[in-house]
Structure formats: structure tokens, C-alpha cells
Amino acid sequence: MKNVIESYLKKSKYNIDNLLNVENKEIISCAKILVKTIKQDKKILICGNGGSASDAQHFAAELIGRFKLDRRAFPAISLNTDTSAITAIANDYDYSKVFSRQIEGIGNKGDLLFAISTSGKSKNIIEAALTARSKKIKVIGLTGAKNSKLEKYSDICIKAPCEITSHIQELHITIIHLLCILVELEILEKK
């Protein structure tokens, strides 16, 4: 058991160290888009499946609540939290429409879609990105290292430098926390 723990933690450390090699400009560019969206009083719509759904909820909570600094609430909505909407849309249409249908209803030009997918190929995430683009909503993708459809449909895509789902998710939460720090600092410093 000790070997399993050590091996896993060494891999996690390696991945975090590798995150330093991700273009900082991508993370900074994403933070700037988030800040611009907030300053224009537009919404940040966030979605994901499974573990990425949890990350979407976590990110929305950090934005609407607070991360480290006391400040006003930022307009963020996790699209995977309304079980009535999700189950109705999946039942009446198709599961691939559970996020795109919500974007169709509440998304407006100037809003931002933050789409999380470890594979970058989830049908409902791709549909969300396509619907967002059709409504002039910018798309930020957060994926794993492989090239993906989500990357293709994103204005900016941050690719976690790993191909193992559990480790991608660890990197995603680190990236989300970095974005929270950058957004809070940028908005509070430029009051």
C-alpha cells in the first residue's frame, strides 16, 4: 500500500511541476476574459460532467461567494446543478442538449462559457460550446493534454499536461484556483 501511495503522489507532484510548463499566457488570457466578463456585468456559465461537474460547481461557488478576498459576488452559474432542468431536457430532447438548451435560454451575447472536460470530447460539452459561439458567447475550454473538439470550439483552451483522468482533474482544480486568485487580485487592485 505504501508503494501505491508514494507512486501516486510522485505522479501528482510531477504533473504539478509540469503545469509550470503550460503557457502562463493561456491562464493569464483566461483570467483577463473572466475579469472583462465580470466588469461588464455579464454571466459566467460553467459546465462539466462527473468530476468536472463538481469542478464547475466549485468554481461557480468560489466566484459567487469568495475565494480568498472579501469582494462583491461575481455572476457565475454552474449549469449542472439544476437537476430538474437537466432531467427534463435529457428526457424531452437528449442528454447531449442538457447544457446547450440552458445556454439557449439564459445565455446572452457577452456572457462567457467555461467548459470543463478531461477528454474534451463530451457531446453535451461540445453542444454547449457550439450554442455559445452561435450566441456570441466566448468559450474557455479546460481539458487534458490531448487535442480535442472542445479545444477547436474554444476561444482559449487550457490543456492540463496529462492524459490520466484523475490527474487531469487534480490539475484542473489547481488551474481553477489560480484563475480565482488572478481574478480577485485584478478586480480588487483596479477599483
Image (cartoon, grey):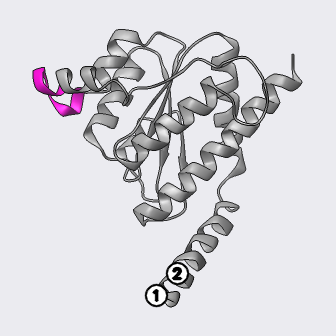
Q: Main secondary structure of the magenta part?
A: helix
x, y percent for residue 150: 39, 41
Q: Would you place residue 16 above or below residue 185 in this image? A: below
Q: Secondary structure at mark 1?
A: loop
Res 48 → quadrant: top left
**In the displayed structure image, the side of residue 79 where residue 31 appears, left or right:** right
In which quadrant of the rendered image does the C terminus lie? top right
Q: Going 64% across and 19% down the picture, which residue do you hit?
A: 74
Query: Tag 2: residue type?
Result: Ile
At label 2, counting other C-alpha atoms closer than 10 Å, the crowd grade (few under 14, some 14-19, many 20 or more) is few
Tag shown at residue 1? 1
Numbered badge on residue 119: none
Residue bearing the label numbered 2: 5
Of 84 and 137, nearer the camera is: 84
Q: Is residue 142 left or right of residue 92?
A: right
Is any atom of residue 90 visible in this view? yes
Q: From which residue to which does the magenta span run?
A: 90-97
